[in-house]
Amino acid sequence: MTVNPIDFFVDTLRTYPPIAVFLALGIGFVIGPIKIAGFNLGNVTATLLAGVVIGQLGIQVSGDLKSTLFLIFLFAVGYGVGPQFVRGLSTDGPKQILFALSVLVLCLIVPYLCALVAGLPLGYGAGMYAGSQTISAAIGVASDQINAMGMTPEQAKTYTDQIPIAYAVTYIWGTIGSAIILAQLGPRLLGIDLPAACKEYEAKLGGGTVSTEPGITRAYHDFGLRAYRIDEASGLTGTPVRNLLPGIRVFVERLRRGDQIIEADGNTVLQPGDIVAFSGRRALLVEHLDSKLVEVEDKELLNAEAEVLDVYVTNKALAGRTLADVSTEDWARGVYARKIVRSLVEIPVLPGTTVERGDIVTIGGARRHVEAAIKALGFADRPVETTDIAFLGWGLFFGAMVGALTLTIGGIPIGLSTSGGALLAGLVLGWLRSTYPAFGTIPAPALWLMNTLGLNIFIAVVGIGAGPGFVAGLQEVGISLLIWGIVATSVPMIASVLIGHYVFRFHPAILFGACAGVRTTTAALGMIQEAAKSKVPALGYGMPYAIGNTLLTIFGLVIVIMLAPSGGP
C-alpha cells in the first residue's frame, strides 16, 4: 500500500495539533529575522502568518494550550518590568510618567476613533488597536474580554477570529512606520541633528573624557592589571594609595614586598622597591604610569582572582545617584561597571548615568572588591539553573483568581480577566523580588523563554484557529484596514515627538528613546540608536516602556469595552 506523503503530512497535523504549533514556530523564527531593506517581520508576526497558512488545513488546536501559555507570558512581562513600573508610580521621574500617560491616551483614543469612522466590527477594531500599537499581548486580553461578554459562542468566535486578521494587516506599518517616524521623520520635523545631540548629551554625562571618572565610561574588558616597580623618584611613596592619583580610577590591587604578597587597600603606603599590581583602563595605565615606572612581569603577583557578574540593585540609598557619585564610595574601589540593563534594555554606562532600583549592573574587578560591592548594591544575580516554580505557580494562581472577578456595568461584564490578573501578579511579584531578592528566582534565560515561547505559541494557535477565515476577512477589509492602521500608528507617534519636545522639553538625545519606550517598540529603538550612532537614546526608554507595556496590554480590554455594541451583547 502506497502512502501519499501530502496526505500523511496533513493527516498527521490534524491528528496531532501540537505538531502544527511547533511547525508554525519553526517557520516564524526562520522568516521573522530576515531583513529586507533594513526591516523584518519579526518573530511574532511571522509566526502568526505561518499559523494562518497552516490553519488553511483545518487543524483544531485546544484553546487551553493557548490560554495557559499566554498567562505565563503575561506573568513574565510583569515580572520583568515590575521594578521600573512601581518606581514610576512613586516619586521618581514624574515628567516621564506624565509624558507616557499623555501618549498612551492617544494610543487608545486614535485607534478607537479610526474604528468608529471606518465602521469596523468589534474584532477588527480590537485587532487594529493591537497591530497599530504593536502590542501583541492585547490580542489575548481582548479575546478574553470578548469571551467574557456573554455573547453566543458563534458571535464570540467571529469577533476573536477577526482580531488576528486586523493585527497582521496593521502590525507591519505599526513596526516599520514607528521606526521611520522616530528615527527619520521626527528629527527632521524638529530640525535636530540626532548624532550631534547624542554626542552633546554624552559629553554632559561625562562620556568620552579622561578627567571625569573615565574608569566608568568603558566596558570592563578595556581594563587590565599591570605590574610596575616603585622607586624613590616616582613620587608614589610615603602616602596612602587612595591619594596617589586623585580623580583617576587607577587602583593598587596588591604588591610584592620582598618575598611577601600583600593585598592592598586604600590605606596601604608604597615603599621603594615594591612591585605593585595596578588595575585600571589600559589607556590610563599607559598615560599615568608608563612614563614614571618600569613595568615588570610577575605572574604570581598578577594571578589575582577576578570576577565578573550581574548584580540586581536593591539599595534605596543608591537610587537616583550617578555612577560618578557612586564610584566615590569606599566599596567601589577597584570595581568597574561593564553594562547596565534597565527594563530589559541595555543603557549606556556613563559617569552621569543614574542608578535605579531594579537595574541589573554587570560589574567586574578583583573578587574581593566585587564581593564587597555586591553587599552595597543589592543581590548577586549569579548564574543558576533552577526557577522557583512554587513562586511562579502561586503567583499565576492568585493573579488569575483576582482577574477572574468581574463587575457588570450596563450589561457589560468588566474585570481584569485572568490574563490581566497574571500581568498584575507579575508586576507586584517582580517589584517584591527587587526589594526582597532572596525569593522568587527566575533566571534571565528562563524569563526570556517564558516571554518568547509563551507569546509565540499563543500567537501560533491564534493564527491556526483563524486560518480558515483569514483570506475572506482580508478581502473584506484589507485596504481600508491598512489605511486606518497607518493613521492609528502615525498620529500618536508624531504627536509623541511634538509633545515630548514642546511640552515636556526632553533633551533630543533621549526624546526619541522615550517615544519608542511608551509604544514598547524595541525595533524602533534599535533604528533610533543606529541613526544616532549612540546608545544614549536608551536612557529615555526604561520608565516609559514599563508603563507603556502594562497599560497598552490592559487597553486591549478597554478597547473591547469601548467598541462593544451599545446595550451589551
Image: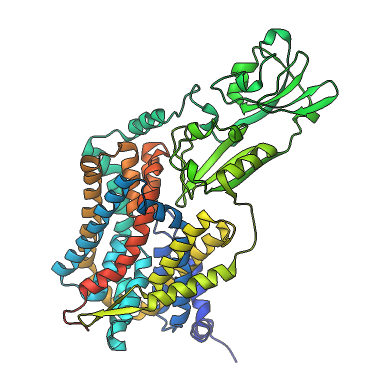
- Measured as percent of width and height from the top left, residue 21 is found at 49, 75
**Position of 526 relative to 20 (above/below):** above
* Snapshot colouring: rainbow
Residue 483 seen in the current view: no
Residue for point 79% across, 25% down: 298
Q: Residue 49 sits in which quadrant? A: bottom left
Outermost residue, right direction? 259
Question: Which residue is more in the foreground, 425 or 163?
Answer: 425
Outermost residue, left direction? 117
- Measured as percent of width and height from the top left, residue 518 is found at 33, 53
Which part of the image, by quadrant, shows the C terminus? bottom left
Question: Which residue is more in the foreground, 71 or 175?
Answer: 71
Outermost residue, bottom direction? 1
Residue for point 43% across, 62% down: 427
Count the marks: how many? 0
- Measured as percent of width and height from the top left, residue 145 is found at 32, 76
Which part of the image, by quadrant, shows the N terminus? bottom right
Residue for point 23% across, 35% down: 191
Question: Which residue is more in the foreground, 40 or 379?
Answer: 379
Q: Residue 286 sits in which quadrant? A: top right
**Position of 286 relative to 333 (above/below):** above
Q: Is residue 274 left or right of residue 567?
A: right
- Measured as percent of width and height from the top left, residue 129 is found at 27, 65
Q: Is residue 551 left or right of residue 336?
A: left
Residue 325 seen in the current view: yes
